[in-house]
Every structure is written in structure tokens, then in C-alpha cells.
Amino acid sequence: MTVAGLVLAAGSGSRFGGPKALIELDGEHFVDRAVRMMCDAGCEPVVVVLGCCAAEVAAAATLDPAVVVVNDDWASGMASSLRTGLRALAEHDVDAAVVGLVDQPLVTSATVRRLIDSRSARSAVVASYRGSNRNPVLLERSIWDDVCSAAVGDVGARGWLRAHPDDVLAVACDDLGSDFDIDTTADLRRLADDATMEDSS
């Protein structure tokens, strides 16, 4: 059974002031960090969806060994990037895909592996933090078309997940990382401050 990785990294980062794919943490771009995390979890292939400033991101980041696709309709919201990525993965012989967001740098490969190891008869497995369903999420290939149909604007897979609760397995991942997302420069400073405090403790 083959599980692919899908990294959504097409947004403009308007609240941050630029594409979050190019934010650096420990000398590594967020988008490269996300690709490495998926690869370390055993996902193959790993597809990255770029959009805003795609050429700039592609030139600055490493992106190896990811398959890069560009969503020209990125401004319409996350849903179009999810559709772009799943359609690209439909050309590969994979059974499921783990979808992750580029602006959650504390999601770990162990989290992704837990989702993969938790696959069951249900069609989706979602990481849960503090009792709330968040990202990443594993989607079985059988539901990709329905997920794409339910995705609108900035609502990606969440639309399908909420409409089909009996088909979703939530797996607690609080012990493996964090769902903290970076929306502003203040968030990035908080992340850096927290890392500094951990290093000095």
C-alpha cells in the first residue's frame, strides 16, 4: 500500500507579508521542511502545490525530491490547491495521500507515520490536537473526487470531513508535535522565542 504526500504551499501569505513557503526556520525554507517531513515519513511521491510567486519559490527552495505543480487559480483559496494536488497524484499509483500545510512547521514525520499506521476501514484519518481535528489528514484515494467536489474557497478537505464524520478516524497527536501555524511575523517570533527557551532549559 503506497501513501503519497501532498504539501499545499500556494498562498500569498498576505498577513505575513510574503509567501510562507519561503519563511526560514533553522536555515531551512518552510516548503523544504514540509517536503523533508513527508519524505522522512515514507510518503512517495511527495507533491508540492505552488501558486503565488511560484517561480520565486522554485528558484529559492530546494524542493528535492518533490514533484512540483503550479495552481494558477491559487488566489481563489486553498480548495483549488487541494484539487490541483490530488489531480496530479491521480496520475500516480498510490492508495492514499497525506495532505499537509506549509505553514505548520512543527508537524512532524512521526505524526504523518501515525496517521499512516492508523489506516483502517475508514476513508480518512485526521490528526487531532487538544481534542480538535486539524492537519495533516490522510485521504484514501477512493474519496478524492468527492473531497475535490466538496472543497470550496478556503475550505479544503474540511468540507468533506465534516459531512462524513462516520468515515473519519481522529488520531491524537499532541505527543508528537504541534499544529501551531504561522500567519504573521509575530507568530514566527513566538516560534523562535519558544525554541530559544527550550534550548536554554
Image (cartoon, rainbow, N blue to C red):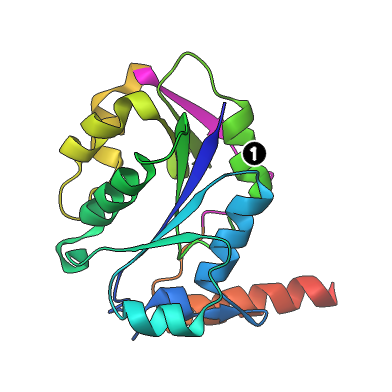
Q: Nearer the viewer, residue 53 or 175?
A: 53
Q: Residue at x 23, y 37 (%)?
A: 159
Q: Which residue is drawn at 33% across and 76% down?
A: 54
Q: Splitting the image into 4 quarters, where does residue 185 fall?
A: bottom left
Measured as percent of width and height from the top left, residue 195 is found at 70, 73
Crowd tier of the residue under label 1, counting other residues whose Cα lies within 10 Å: few below 14, some 14–19, many 20 or above: some
Is residue 174 magenta-colored? yes
Q: Residue at x 27, y 79 (%)?
A: 14
Q: Residue at x 55, y 31 (%)?
A: 171
Q: Which of 73 and 124 is in front in this view?
A: 73
Measured as percent of width and height from the top left, residue 36 is found at 62, 60
Q: What residue type is labelled 1?
A: Arg
The residue that label 1 is drawn on is 113
Q: Is residue 4 above or below residue 196?
A: above
Q: Is residue 87 above or below residue 16?
A: above
Disc 1 element: helix
Chain part drawn in magenta: 167-179
Measured as percent of width and height from the top left, residue 5 is found at 50, 47
Q: Which of 147 and 141 is in front in this view?
A: 141
